[in-house]
Amino acid sequence: MRRHLKLLDFALASLRRRPLKSWGLVVVYAFTVAVVASVLLLTRAIREEAAQILVAAPELTVQRVVGGRHEPIPLSYGDAIRGLPGVMGVEARFWGYTYDAVTDSTITVMGASEGLQGLEMIEGRLPTTATECAVGAGVAEMWGAGTGGEVILVDAESTGVPYEVVGVFRAPSEMLTNDLVTMTSVEAAVFLGLPDGTATDLAVRIANPNEVDTVAAKIKRAHPDSRPITRSEVLRTYDAVFHWRSGMMLAVFSGALVAFAILAWDKATGLSAEERREIGILKAIGWDTADVLELKVWEGLTISLTSLMLGLIAAMVHVFVLGAPLLVPVLRGWSVLFPELRPAPFVDPYMLFAIAFLTVVPYVAATVAPSWKAAITDPDEVVRG
Amino acid sequence: MRPGTEPLVVVDDVTKTYHRGRPDEVRALRGVSVTVSAGEVLVIEGPSGSGKTSLLTVIGCMSRPTSGQVTIGDRRVSRLTESALTGIRRSTFGFIFQKLHLILDLSVEDNVMLPLVPTGMGAAEMKKRVDEALRAMRIEHRRTAAVGRISGGEQQRTAVARALVNAPTIIIADEPTAHLDGELSAELLAILGQLNDEGTTVVMATHDPRVTAHPAVHRRVVMQDGRIVEGGAG
């Protein structure tokens, strides 16, 4: 044990003797770990957010598809669906998007006469008349429009329509509600230009979650132009989208990863003449090959574990404290008005292990391999040199 | 100290060939036999390329002979594993290299401590040994200085202190005065003479006549073209 501690002590002293090289490696290495860990942590956080949103979503959403396009769905479909066994209720939903050129933002407009599940009013109330609206906290902040203020939204006829803000709300997940404006359902239908007797889609509540697929199949049979979407399908889509985006990000950063790999390889493997000479001296004065290799393993572990820790801490601060300002625009690129993301600190041990395995092991191996080649050389070469 | 009659190192018909079978093959030793007695100061003389350093590395267990036998004490070492040779090197030999081979950005005491690091020796014992070696070489006052920042003479004494720290039976010195002026050479030879008085066997390779003529030297052998041409008998 004493021998190992002495070798560790000597390894630390060796790293201190080359501060520029050691700290240079740690900084580049930690940055790479921080980038990869940030992408993975943020992706997971967004997927968790998406899953949280969908908890409040209906088990089944029914849209109408004509010619491959999403078309308004007749309210009469809802009456028919309501009569199917297992269906507890059907709610027509009126929603769509409007673009605000002043702030370059895409706003979601939604009818919410009976309120929306999971919404929490920060101030005021939900709208009750055609000239009123309530806005999400992000919208209120961007427009500087609190309760009592006025906003102008561009309707389906490209006409600016003034609305009085009667409330500001937020939700446990700010992902959607932060760019959301609600109005009465009737007004939303008019604003979005929905034909009379139609809605954007239908939300279907089902008594037994196990029967969702059965009900969906029955709806499809009764209305061949309908597209029933189950909650699990939406969740899978979100998962796939964010997996894809994180994969894209990692691909984008792969250049940095490759650059790091080259740098690490060069720094770790490129034993300088001085280092080779040192190994020769150690061998000549009685160090075994195993002693030299253990020294190099300690050096590699010190560099890589320090970098791993610093990189992970940086990633956690970036994602969980600062809200991932460097990555969010890419990962959530579907919205112009970005909801503020404060993901709950959550660390996946498997992810940590994967990052550690993919960074520490190759680095230590890259450090030890060339030293091994130098260490198995007969020590007489140093004497002769 | 007068050398004993008991052989401490026996080199018997040893050859050493580098880069065997390649165009740049070098036959450094060609059937060398020599015996070193306990307590002896033996000088190996010869011009550059005569095989002095090769013979030292074979005696010092830094390389294995291509053929022939080397015996240290009662152990035949010619075919031992690398690990076993390291063990013998660590316990039996102290090395003073021609170019000193100190680690310049380590302190004097850290350089001296180096041979003890992988031994698992306790910190107190290690410190005691280092202190003794530094004191013996009168370099104690420079113990925390980086070796790259001390004088040539102090570096020389540091190298000798490192060779002494594991209390070796045999000191192997390769051209120890090659880069020293007259005063430093005399000082080093005096130190080696003193170590020999205390019982340490010394084997030196040199072509410096000041070394050969030093009163501490008991015997000299002369090498040429990989062979001992004078004084080979133990």
Image: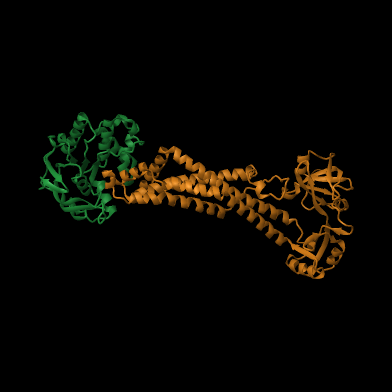
Q: Is residue B122 left or right of residue A312?
A: left
Quadrant (top left/top right/bottom left/bottom right) for the C terminus of chain A: top left
**Residue B65 against residue A79 in the figure, above or below:** above
Q: Position of residue A39 (x, y in %)?
A: 60, 49
Q: How many marks?
A: 0
Q: Nearer the viewer, residue A36 or A342?
A: A36
The residue depicted at 20 percent of the width and 32 percent of the height is: B185
Q: Quadrant of residue B124?
A: top left
Q: Is residue A150 left or right of residue B20?
A: right
The residue depicted at 73 percent of the width and 45 percent of the height is: A337
Q: Is residue A113 left or right of residue A106?
A: right
Q: Nearer the viewer, residue A349 or A34?
A: A34
The residue depicted at 21 percent of the width and 39 percent of the height is: B175
Which shade of the palette goes to chain A? orange
Q: Is residue A123 left or right of residue A239?
A: right
* Color encoding of the figure: by chain
Q: Position of residue B57 (x, y in %)?
A: 23, 47
The residue depicted at 26 percent of the width and 42 percent of the height is: B166
The chain that appears green in the image is: B
Q: Position of residue A171 (x, y in %)?
A: 75, 48
Q: Quadrant of residue B213?
A: top left
**Residue A283 against residue B198 in the figure, above or below:** below
**Which residue is farthest front?**
B23
Q: Is residue B165 visible?
A: yes
Q: Is residue A343 visible?
A: no
